[in-house]
């Protein structure tokens, strides 16, 4: 038998049961499991690589790489400021679009609980 013939037989003989009995209706729980937030990609990676390349080129002399050092320092300070702002918003319960913690979701789901069926 050819491969094509086997495919035709399997397709025509195997018919899944269209009705699957459900034991419970679909419903959301009123809480989510507590998980730590995934670490984001390293911030300021390009600035750090530019600084390291400059140091290598200038035999690790800081005076020659002041521009790269200041760019890296500025980027680092901005990313730390963003992290602190997100942590403060998470403690206060404010929800940003796309960035929520499990504690924030649990608080929100307590405000709008699902009916038990």
Image (tube, helix red, strand yellow):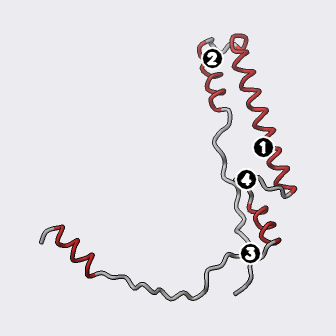
Q: Position of residue 35 (x, y in %)?
A: 70, 61
Measured Cα–Cα span from mark 1 to mark 4: 15 Å
Q: Position of residue 41 (x, y in %)?
A: 63, 42
Question: Which circle's residue, 1 or 4, is located before the other in the chain?
Answer: 1
Q: Which residue is mark 1?
A: 83
Viewer-side label of 1, 4: 4
Q: Is residue 110 depicted above or below 51 in this figure?
A: below
Q: Position of residue 9 (x, y in %)?
A: 21, 77
Viewer-side label of 2, 4: 4
Viewer-side label of 3, 1: 3
Question: Which circle's residue, 3 or 1, is located before the other in the chain?
Answer: 3
Residue at the (78%, 34%) spot, across then down: 78
Q: Position of residue 16 (x, y in %)?
A: 37, 82
Which element carries disc 4, helix, strand or loop? loop
Residue at the (65%, 39%) spot, across then down: 42
Measured Cα–Cα span from mark 1 to mark 2: 28 Å
Foreground residue, 91 or 7?
Answer: 7
Measured Cα–Cα span from mark 2 to mark 3: 53 Å
Q: Quadrant of the C terminus?
A: bottom right
- Label disc, if present, on residue 17 of the rendered structure: none
Q: Which residue is mark 4?
A: 97
Measured Cα–Cα span from mark 2 to mark 4: 38 Å
Measured Cα–Cα span from mark 3 to mark 1: 28 Å
Q: Which residue is mark 3?
A: 30
Measured Cα–Cα span from mark 3 to mark 4: 20 Å
Question: Which circle's residue, 2 or 4, is located before the other in the chain?
Answer: 2
Q: Crowding at label 4, few (<14), some or many (≥20) Cα neighbours within 10 Å?
A: few
Residue projecting furthest to the left: 1
Please indicate whether residue 35 sits to the left or right of residue 112 in the image: left
Question: Which circle's residue, 1 or 2, is located before the other in the chain?
Answer: 2
Circles 2 and 3, Cβ within 8 Å, touching? The answer is no
- Label disc, if present, on residue 54 of the rendered structure: 2
């Amino acid at each position: 038998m050819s491969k094509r013939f086997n495919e035709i037989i399997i397709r025509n003989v195997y018919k899944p049961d269209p009705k699957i009995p459900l034991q419970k209706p679909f419903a959301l729980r009123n809480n989510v499991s507590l998980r730590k937030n995934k670490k984001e990609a390293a911030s300021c990676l390009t600035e750090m690589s530019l600084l390291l390349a400059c140091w290598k080129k200038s035999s690790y002399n800081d005076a020659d790489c002041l521009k790269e050092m200041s760019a890296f320092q500025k980027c680092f300070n901005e990313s730390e400021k963003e992290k602190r702002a997100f942590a403060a918003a998470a403690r206060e319960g404010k929800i940003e679009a796309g960035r929520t913690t499990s504690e924030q979701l649990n608080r929100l789901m307590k405000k709008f609980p699902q009916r038990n069926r």
